[in-house]
Image (tube, rainbow, N blue to C red):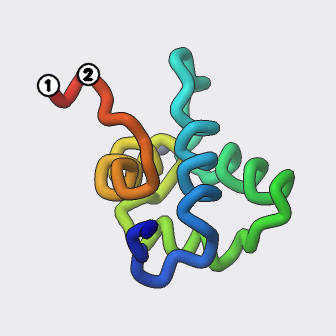
């Protein structure tokens, strides 16, 4: 059974795909916007406003904070492998 994430407007698998999309080995410098996140949501036909609102409620104010904060909180729940940095 997948764990239920409170108020998440997209599926757990879609959230995992977003984390995978943003978590690149050599990311562009973050512009402190949701530019990359928004592009992902558009190309996957996901609800933009609701998802950005949820991310904001879960620690993210921009693309890099989605990884630093939201992935750190929910990544394992949606099946992401914890990074070595945490060891
Ligand atoms: Zn940022």
Rendered-image quadrant of the N terminus: bottom left
> Dot 2 lies on which element?
helix
According to the picture, the residue beneath numbered tag 1 turns out to be 87
Q: Residue furthest top?
A: 26
Q: Nearer the viewer, residue 53 or 75?
A: 75
The residue that appears at 42% across and 76% down in the rendered structure is 4
Q: Nearer the viewer, residue 30 or 80?
A: 80
- Residue 79 disc label: none
According to the picture, the residue beneath numbered tag 2 turns out to be 84
Q: Nearer the viewer, residue 17 or 48?
A: 17
State left or right for residue 33 relative to residue 64: right
Please tell me whether residue 67 is drawn above or below residue 45 in the rendered image.
above
Q: Position of residue 52 (x, y in %)?
A: 59, 68
Q: Position of residue 53 (x, y in %)?
A: 55, 75
Q: Position of residue 29 (x, y in %)?
A: 55, 27
Q: Quadrant of residue 87?
A: top left
């Amino acid at each position: 059974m997948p764990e239920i994430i409170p108020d998440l407007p997209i599926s757990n698998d879609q959230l995992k795909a977003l984390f995978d999309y943003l978590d690149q080995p050599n990311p562009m410098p973050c512009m402190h916007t949701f530019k990359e996140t928004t592009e992902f949501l558009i190309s996957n036909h996901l609800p933009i406003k609701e998802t950005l609102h949820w991310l904001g409620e879960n620690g993210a104010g921009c693309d890099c904070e989605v990884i630093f904060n939201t992935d750190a909180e929910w990544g394992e729940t949606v099946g992401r492998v914890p990074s070595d940095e945490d060891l």
